[in-house]
Image: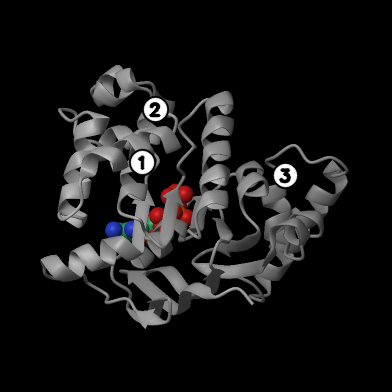
Amino acid sequence: MPEPLLQVSGLHRTFGDVHAVDDVSFTLNEGASLGIVGGSGSGKTTTARIVVGLESADAGEVRVRGRVRPARLRGRARRLAGARQVQMVFQDPYLSLDPRTSAEDVLRETLRLHFPERDPVPRIRELLDQVGLGARAAEALPRQLSGGQRQRVAIARALAVEPEVLVLDEAVAALDVSVQAQILNLLADIREQTPIGYLFITHDLGVVRCVTDELLVMRHGRVVEAGPTSDVLAAPQHPYTRLLLDSVPHPGWDPGRIAEARQELAVSERSGATS
Ligand SMILES: Nc1ncnc2c1ncn2[C@@H]1O[C@H](COP(=O)(O)OP(=O)(O)OP(=O)(O)O)[C@@H](O)[C@H]1O
């Protein structure tokens, strides 16, 4: 039996009148990849930010390997320990990378912070190698790199900390399709080499099809459907999931069924049966 790596239960978070996260629960097993999909404002990012510790929950609990993750990571020791559990890769690495720091330097700094007793040099080489960055890219500043290379730097920095869970929030959304494929392949390779678990936040069902084994569909802060990715995509149960599927090329999926799903969703919403 795979070990539960990340257990999220009963998360709630409101912003004023908006129930951004409304009773969200899920489990991510060791070595697994869980996708959270949903349209804009469905609560994906807020869920991810709570898991990482960037946002607090009004209620609910996040456990990593059975241990409750504190809502706020106060103090240096706690922050470092918390960072070693969960790391996040954002959509735009340009914003999360220091413009004056090369990949090599950012890795050196990260390793010095987390593993001060270790010699960082061999590990830097290993990480650069793992994410496919050559010597020139390693010495370049973020603005001298392509979007894909920058995302590789962000991934290497996250891996340097040796996290249990990697949260990827729209991590390939800003990239060209061919570069997206390269980064998704890289992430798949990393998962084969390490017991890391991925939490993949995306609006793109094409992406989840490639890189996740479990899927959670969110709408208005709630989980409307959950299950193995292949099952959910092959036989979506909720009309909202069917509508989301409309946005990706889907062999065997006909427009009549999409119209039907839209109708069904409208009816269920009028009756208040679904959220
Ligand atoms: N800091 C905040 N202050 C106020 N409202 C917020 C805040 N963060 C999120 N929200 C609201 O909570 C809801 C869920 O937002 P969230 O960003 O989690 O959704 P999302 O599914 O990630 O959407 P997107 O794909 O557009 O990022 C939205 O209505 C959003 O406006």
**Whether label 1 touches label 2, CB < 8 Å:** yes
**Residue type at tag 1:** Ala
Place of residue 228 in the rendered image (x, y in percent of width and height, measured from the top left): 70, 64
**Crowdedness near tag 3: few (<14), some (14–19) or many (≥20) residues, C-alpha within 10 Å:** some
Place of residue 229 in the rendered image (x, y in percent of width and height, measured from the top left): 69, 58
Place of residue 272 in the rendered image (x, y in percent of width and height, measured from the top left): 63, 75
The residue carrying mark 1 is 156
Tell me the number on the disc at residue 246: 3
**Crowdedness near tag 1: few (<14), some (14–19) or many (≥20) residues, C-alpha within 10 Å:** many
**Residue type at tag 2:** Leu
**Mark 3 to mark 2 CA distance (whole Å):** 36 Å
Tell me the number on the disc at residue 133: 2
Question: Which residue does the image show at 66% across and 42% down from the upper left?
Answer: 206
Quarter containing the N terminus: bottom right
Farthest residue in the left direction? 75
**Mark 1 to mark 3 CA distance (whole Å):** 34 Å
**Crowdedness near tag 2: few (<14), some (14–19) or many (≥20) residues, C-alpha within 10 Å:** some
Q: Is mark 2 within 8 Å of ligand 1?
A: no
**Whether label 1 touches label 3, CB < 8 Å:** no
